[in-house]
Image (spheres, rainbow, N blue to C red):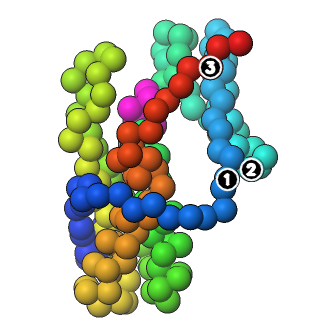
Amino acid sequence: MPGMGAARFRHRGSTQLSATAMEISAIVSHSGMEHAVTVRTDGNAREFAIPSMESGQGSGVNGGEFLLLALATCYSNDLYREAAQMGITLQAVAVEASATFSGPGLAAADIRYRARVASPADASTIADLLRRTDAVAEVHNTVRAGVPVTLVTD
């Protein structure tokens, strides 16, 4: 976005915060050319459209893209939350997340994100907001902590 301040952050340590727990889940189901996606937070379910692959087998959006979307979305939403707490007006926010995946089954490397914020606040205040939000972004802190992922079989 033209005229917006920019910042790029890499992990410099994680911050543990206490807050009210939320139960969050995502469901993907696929059959033939039908592809359904539902996300849920504390029982509030929302469905949204994601196309199937052209072959009809699987999602047209891959997991790495969703991971980076989760990082970008989390930081964007958290910028608005933290700005409100700090009394800062945000006119626009854009967040881009990127990573390198070297091959099937390999973890992402070089995960980065950049945020651009338009605001009447001064550059120092925006820099503080960006750092504060980086420290509390939940998805980022989950990835940084290397939380185990467990396959549950019925």
74 shown above or below 130: above
Q: Nearer the viewer, residue 134 or 55?
A: 134
Tag 2, which secondary structure?
Answer: loop
Q: The magenta stretch spans which residues?
A: 62-66
Q: Examine the residues drawn in magenta and state their main secondary structure.
A: helix
Q: Amino acid at mark 2?
A: Asp
Q: Is the residue under label 1 in contact with that under label 2 (CB below 8 Å)?
A: yes
Tag 1, which secondary structure?
Answer: loop
Q: Which mark is residue 106?
A: none
Q: Which mark is residue 152?
A: 3
Examine the image and state in which quarter residue 2 appears: bottom left
86 shown above or below 131: below
Q: Do we see residue 29 in this rendering?
A: yes
Q: Which residue is mark 1?
A: 22
Q: Amino acid at mark 1?
A: Met
Q: Which residue is mark 2?
A: 42
